[in-house]
Amino acid sequence: MNTVLAVETSCDESAAAVVRGEQVLASAVASQIAEHARWGGVVPEIASRRHVEALPQLIASVMAESGLGFADLDGIAATVAPGLVGALLVGSVTARTLARLHDRPFVAVHHLEGHLCSVHLGEPLPAGPFLVLLVSGGHTELVRVDGAGHYRRLGRSHDDAAGEAFDKVARLLGLGYPGGPAIQAAGALGNPLRFPLPKGRVSRPEGGYHPYDFSFSGLKTAVLRLVQSLRAGTGAAGPADPASTAELAAQDLADVAASFEQAVVDVLVERSCRCARDEGLGTLVLVGGVAANQRLRQRLEERCGALGLHWRRAPLAYCTDNAAMIGVAAAQRLAAGSSSSTALGVAARLPLQQSETLYEQQPSF
Ligand code: KG4
Ligand code: ZN
């Protein structure tokens, strides 16, 4: 089994981990959330600086906790795409430098492949291909997995990612960043059925709708209008007064948060279950930051139960960004005989299906 030191710096979490196969020997995350919260979202320049400051200590601590030396490692891994370029560079340069210094193979990892692999850190999966609903701050995708490295995207969001919709709606409700946990807390005692909100569908040029695709921008606008009309004290049906900045009544706030959450959860669950059924897949897997959402997990469990589908979720600690999932992905790649060139750069965007290019010895970027 391959033992890997992995680092993750694609966005606002600096993370390092040592894994052996699918077993985590040590994992540490330094979150920058408090710092970015002041600005209402991630500031790329600040993220890069904080990664530079945090990584040496994180790496030293996971290596010490694992009780291993660099000579015991089969590879050193980093996320190289997709993400914030400056942030990715910090992790990638660090891992490539360590790999050259200690003469270990370097393993580049696609961030979404890391999220897909986070499910292996939980209960074992039933045998056979499965469908993954990957919902994070940057992505909303339905991916069919036919084995390590064999991915086919069957659905995606055409605008905001689900987590991004949570973050933007939280901001307009004055709930702060990150929005997912804030909306979950605000909506816990709210009535999710009080405000029916649109379930964005994506038209096909040839007519009809993409059955497994998502759109959250209309939902966000509908929440904005709803909040404006509530603030103006007219109720949902009345004319909006965009100039009003009045506070929402506590119950209205709770009901808006719960209704928004319900609308997102309904489309995610309905379209993923339909996709799994149409593809003849018996297992549905939930990964990414939004997988931490309570309402989503409950609804998915109910629907999968009713349809006779197995469902699995990555352990809560590995839903949001971490390096253990990157380590598992790297260990799988090493086991398949792949490693990366230390000349490989980083990429802000790279479709998951192109993750094979990370293992070419003449890298294209
Ligand atoms: O996977 P992740 O840590 O980072 C990305 O790769 O994007 O996901 C972060 C996203 C944020 O948008 C955050 O608001 C959302 O996950 N999130 C949640 C919850 N916890 C985190 N969304 C809904 N409910 C939650 N409990
Ligand atoms: Zn992520």
Image (cartoon, helix red, strand yellow):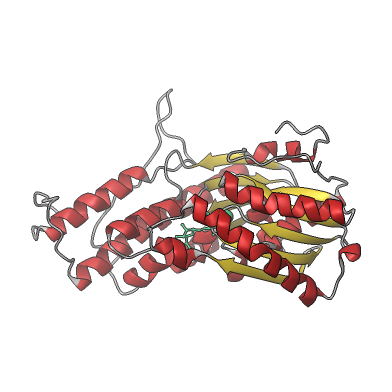
Quadrant housing residue 354: top right
Quadrant housing residue 26: bottom right
Q: Residue at x 27, y 69 (%)?
A: 254
| Left or right, 295 with reference to 57 | left
Q: Height in image: 292 above or below 103?
A: below
Residue 312 appears in view: no
Locate residue 172, reporting x and y percent.
Answer: 28, 57
Q: Quadrant of the C terminus?
A: top right
| Left or right, 86 with reference to 22 | left
The residue furthest top is 206
Of residue 177 and residue 261, the one placed in the foreground of this image is: 177
Locate residue 272, reporting x and y percent.
Answer: 52, 50
Q: Height in image: 234 above or below 255?
A: above
Q: Residue at x 59, y 68 (%)?
A: 30
| Left or right, 106 with reference to 150 | right
Of residue 46 and residue 244, the one placed in the foreground of this image is: 46
Q: Residue at x 69, y 69 (%)?
A: 57
| Left or right, 61 with reference to 336 | left
